[in-house]
Image (tube, helix red, strand yellow):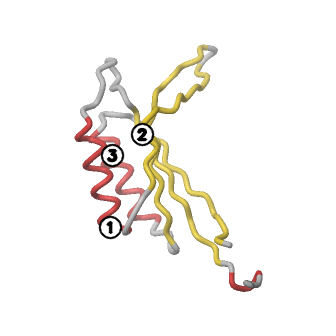
Amino acid sequence: MTSASQSRTIHIVQILLPVFDNEGREFDASHYTHVRTELADRFGGLTAYSRAPAEGLWGNEGALKRDDIVVFEVMVETLDRDWWSSYRKALEHRFRQDSIMMRVLASEVL
């Protein structure tokens, strides 16, 4: 039996990557393979939600916009904000995006 004192907090970093570029062209699968390899090599594993792209909707100046996205998740014990910020900028360049959503969630491992 484990006690509550044995639980630990981790950070789940989620990266939401677009399926299509701004001109509507689908990104080649190699883009996602490259990200998967980079993250798995650096952090020892990841979860990729890529089989059925998620649908993202948001409002902008009264118009509803839609994106198909692939989500990558990495669990880390220590959050290196500088590294993640730099990596987000690299992904924005690679995927030709003004902004890529990257978020972190604190989570408790039971």
What residue is pinned by disc 2? 50
At mark 2, the secondary structure is strand
Q: Which residue is drawn at 49% across and 69% down?
A: 76
Q: In this view, does 64 lie above or below 31?
A: above
Residue 10 on image: x %, y %? 58, 70
The three-letter amino acid code for the residue at tag 3 is Leu
Instruction: Give how far across and how far down residue 43 sits, in percent.
Output: 38, 68
Q: Which of 93 and 21 is in front in this view?
A: 21
Q: Is mark 1 on a helix, strand or loop?
A: helix
* Residue at the spot of label 1: 42
Mark 3 lies on a secondary structure that is helix
Q: Residue at x 31, y 18 (%)?
A: 23
Q: Distance between the residues labelled 2 and 3?
A: 17 Å
The N terminus - image quarter: bottom right
Q: Which of marks 2 and 1 is in front?
A: 2
Residue at the disc numbered 3: 91
89 and 42: which is toward the camera: 42
The spot of residue 72 in percent (x, y) is 44, 49
* Tag 3–tag 1 contact (CB < 8 Å): no
Depth order, front residue of 13/44? 44
Crowd tier of the residue under label 1, counting other residues whose Cα lies within 10 Å: few below 14, some 14–19, many 20 or above: few
The amino acid sitting under disc 1 is Arg
**Alpha carbons under labels 3 and 1: distance apart:** 16 Å
Q: Is residue 79 above or below residue 60?
A: below
- Tell me which numbered mark, 3 or 1, is placed earlier along the sequence: 1
* Quadrant location, the C terminus: bottom right
The quadrant holding residue 105 is bottom right
